[in-house]
Image (cartoon, grey):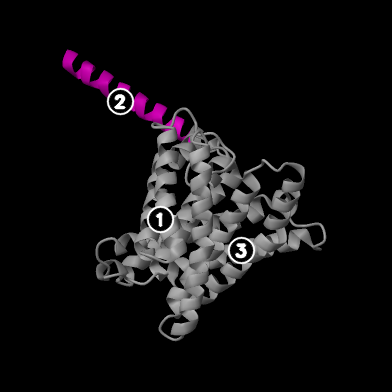
Amino acid sequence: MKGTGIIGNSVNLAAGHSYAIGAFVIGAFAAIPGEVTWSYVVFGGIFVIGLATIFLRGDWQKARGIDRLILFGPIFYAAPLAAFGTEHFTLAQAIASLVPSWIPWHLFWTYLVGACFIAAGLSVATKIYARLSASLLALTFFLFVAVMDAPGWARSWAHDQLSRFPPTLTLRELAFSGGALALAASLSRQSRERGAQILATVARYFVAIPIVFYSFEQFLHGDYVPGVPLNRLTPDYIHGHATWTYLAATVYAVAGILLLIGKKTRAAATWVGLTVLVVELAVYVPIAVAERASINGFNYMADTLMFCGAVFLLAGAMPREA
């Protein structure tokens, strides 16, 4: 009887721990605002769909070596894109305020772009009408640069010539445009070889210029977050701290120059993409976990992953070297 009592107490204790853990998990998720939850849900959904597509289409079985890593380019690009589209609905007023004042119907454009981003993310992940989606995405992000980012950079230059973040944001959008353009080029090769080469070359410059600029920025400001050097210090809880920034800066410097001069372009883009992926796992995933209740925590993680996807898309559009 005494042994039975001990077993009973152990069972009750284990049950109590299970309830406590369950309550903690439920409480942790309950503390996450709806707009963050929806971003994660859409992000995860597109990510899973993209993974399924790779295997169901046989792409994973056909690819060999480092080419299997390049296969993740469309997923890394599409999942954040769709999540950002979701934010156009959950954070509509805040995003509408970014639309230039001379453009009418701010909310209309906010909702329209959000819906298009979600649809384009699904298209890129599934390869259904992906060339059309990629072409429109490249145009959209280029228009963002021309209409919003570049004028914002010019205004900031007039007020504060030392500010380095407006050009960082402008070049990030340019890289997003380049990644989509590279995907369109890689999907156009069979039918329009000459035109695809031109698109791929333009895409290479759209991605290479930000990479070279980011290299200098990361060498100069090692205490800021790596990959896409945004206006945020690397948190103290990140193991290695400035090591990741200098690692990214070094790879960016070498690979960026190779991309600019057109040498070993596929290998150079692949190494940059792999570096950004390592940075994503070492720095941005921990930030997203630590700040899971903040949309900013999600955006830092998703933004850098989308940049990683853009670079892998460029790698996929570059010619194979012997």
Placement of the N terminus among the 4 image quadrants: top left
Report the magenta residues as a range.
Answer: 1-26
Rendering coords of residue 198 (x, y %): 50, 77
In this rendering, does residue 121 appear at all?
no
Eye-nearest disc, 1 or 2 = 1
Q: Seen in the image, is 290 located left or right of residue 89?
A: left
Give the residue at x 69% y 63%: 146
- Asked whether 274 or 221 is in front, the reply is 221
Q: Is residue 4 magenta?
A: yes
Q: In which quarter of the image is residue 36?
A: top right
- Residue at image mark 3: 141
Amino acid marked by disc 1: Ala
Give the residue at x 38% y 59%: 268
In this rendering, does residue 182 appear at all?
yes
Q: Seen in the image, is 164 located left or right of residue 29?
A: right
Rendering coords of residue 34 (x, y %): 59, 45
Q: Residues within 10 Å of mark 1 (few under 14, many from 20)?
A: many
Amino acid marked by disc 2: Ala
Give the CA separation, mark 1 to mark 3.
24 Å
Residue 255 badge: 1
Residue 14 badge: 2
Q: How crowded is mark 3: few (under 14 residues within 10 Å), some or many (20 or more)?
A: many
